[in-house]
């Protein structure tokens, strides 16, 4: 092997040392930290935990004063493992690359962290370890400001029954929602025509979600203001740009670590989960639908 090849397969600590700047930095490392997670883009990986091996090295700015044996003056190892756990708990991911980016970003939010090397390997996908490795520096890490946090959007989530979708006063209902000034996310339930029954819970869940998405497109066809979106990024962008969102639930539900409880065809389960995920200012029920139990979001029933 050449030295470059050896370095490519070396532990991140050796790579950090080899590319160290002229002013040496302190480094802390996490070796062979193995956790289980549901991750992967292939269908056979969904619903099954697999082992992930993390090796992380963080270059840190030296403390200006004496440490005085005070743990609050250092970047603790726990902050690294907490970053991994937090990102794995946030949502189900398809790619190790995405996970590595998010863990790196979270670590670089730490004031003393300057550069991070992360290697993540899948241990159960074959006879060897399959993985990715990234290097990120503070200069390239996005930072959140208090202004961004304070501008977080709290939408109105409005559930529309099938009768409301086809009613002649649909446009007037949407007018009233738009007049509130808050972002609006519209949610629908199952169509009147029942989807196929498989007798198999995982596949039935997918079929039911697709049926709901078909209903979302039916609503979008009824009013040009309605924009069907599927991802959290699309939802956030649409809300910030004044669009009236119609939620297509498959991606968010299937990727969620802690998804809606019970069958998704029960409208109450699904819309309550969405409202809580979006920190909605209120949940409006338009038409004949039972109010979900245990809601932490204010409920309002609108006749229809």
Image: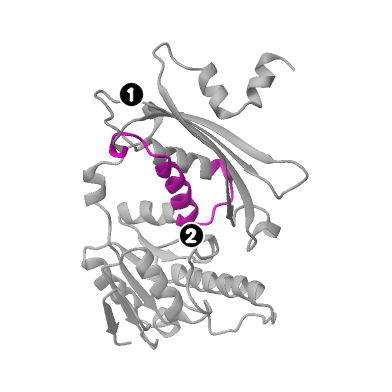
**Residue displayed at 67% across by 80% down:** 196
Q: Mark 1 points at which residue?
A: 62
Q: Which residue lies furthest to the front in this view?
A: 69
Q: Quick check: can you spot residue 176?
A: yes
**Front residue of this view, candidates 298 and 213:** 298
Please say which color scheme the image uses.
one colour
Residue 304 falls in which quadrant of the image?
bottom left
Report the Cα–Cα distance between label 1 and label 2.
44 Å
Residue 82 magenta? yes
Query: Please, what secondary structure does the residue beneath circle 2 have?
Result: loop
Secondary structure mainly formed by the magenta segment:
helix
Query: Please, what secondary structure does the residue beneath circle 1 have?
Result: loop
- Image location of residue 4, percent across then percent down: 65, 17
Q: Which mark is residue 70?
A: none
- Image location of residue 263, percent across then percent down: 53, 79
Relative height, residue 64 to residue 118 (above, below):
above
Q: Which residue lies furthest to the top in this view?
A: 22
Image: magenta residue range? 71-98
Residue 201 falls in which quadrant of the image?
bottom right
Residue 144 falls in which quadrant of the image?
top left
- Image location of residue 134, percent across then percent down: 54, 32
In which quadrant will I find the N terminus?
Answer: top right
Tag 1: Cα neighbours inside 10 Å, few (<14), some, or many (≥20)?
some
**Front residue of this view, candidates 214 and 223:** 214
Relative height, residue 122 to residue 4 (above, below):
below
Q: Residue 230 carries which label?
A: 2
Nearer-N-terminus badge (1/2)? 1
Left or right, 10 with reference to 252: right
- Image location of residue 145, percent across then percent down: 25, 41
**Residue displayed at 21% across by 45% down:** 147
């Amino acid at each position: 092997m050449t030295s470059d090849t050896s370095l490519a397969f070396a532990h991140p600590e050796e790579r950090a040392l080899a590319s160290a700047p002229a002013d040496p930095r302190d480094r802390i490392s996490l070796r062979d930290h193995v956790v289980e997670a549901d991750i992967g883009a292939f269908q056979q990986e969904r619903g099954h935990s697999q082992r992930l091996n993390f090796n992380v090295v963080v270059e840190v700015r030296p403390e200006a004063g004496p440490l005085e044996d005070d743990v609050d003056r250092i970047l603790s190892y726990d902050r690294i493992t907490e970053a991994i756990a937090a990102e794995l708990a946030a949502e189900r991911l398809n790619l190790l690359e995405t996970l590595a980016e998010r863990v790196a970003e979270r670590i670089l939010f730490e004031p003393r962290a300057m550069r991070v090397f992360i290697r993540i390997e899948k241990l159960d996908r074959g006879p060897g370890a399959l993985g990715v490795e990234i290097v990120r520096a503070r200069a390239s890490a996005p930072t959140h400001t208090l202004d961004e946090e304070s501008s977080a959007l709290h939408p109105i989530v409005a559930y529309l029954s099938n009768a409301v979708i086809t009613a002649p006063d649909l446009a007037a209902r949407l007018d009233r929602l738009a007049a509130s000034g808050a972002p609006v996310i519209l949610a629908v339930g199952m169509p009147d025509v029942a989807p196929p029954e498989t007798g198999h819970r995982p596949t039935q869940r997918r079929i039911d979600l697709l049926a709901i998405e078909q209903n979302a497109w039916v609503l979008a066809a009824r009013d040009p203001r309605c924009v069907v979106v599927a991802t959290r990024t699309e939802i956030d962008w649409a809300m910030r740009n004044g669009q009236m969102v119609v939620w297509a639930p498959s991606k968010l539900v299937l990727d969620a670590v802690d998804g809606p409880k019970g069958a998704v065809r029960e409208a109450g389960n699904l819309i309550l989960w969405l409202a809580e995920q979006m920190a909605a200012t209120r949940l409006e029920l338009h038409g004949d639908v039972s109010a979900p139990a245990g809601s932490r979001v204010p409920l309002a029933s609108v006749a229809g």
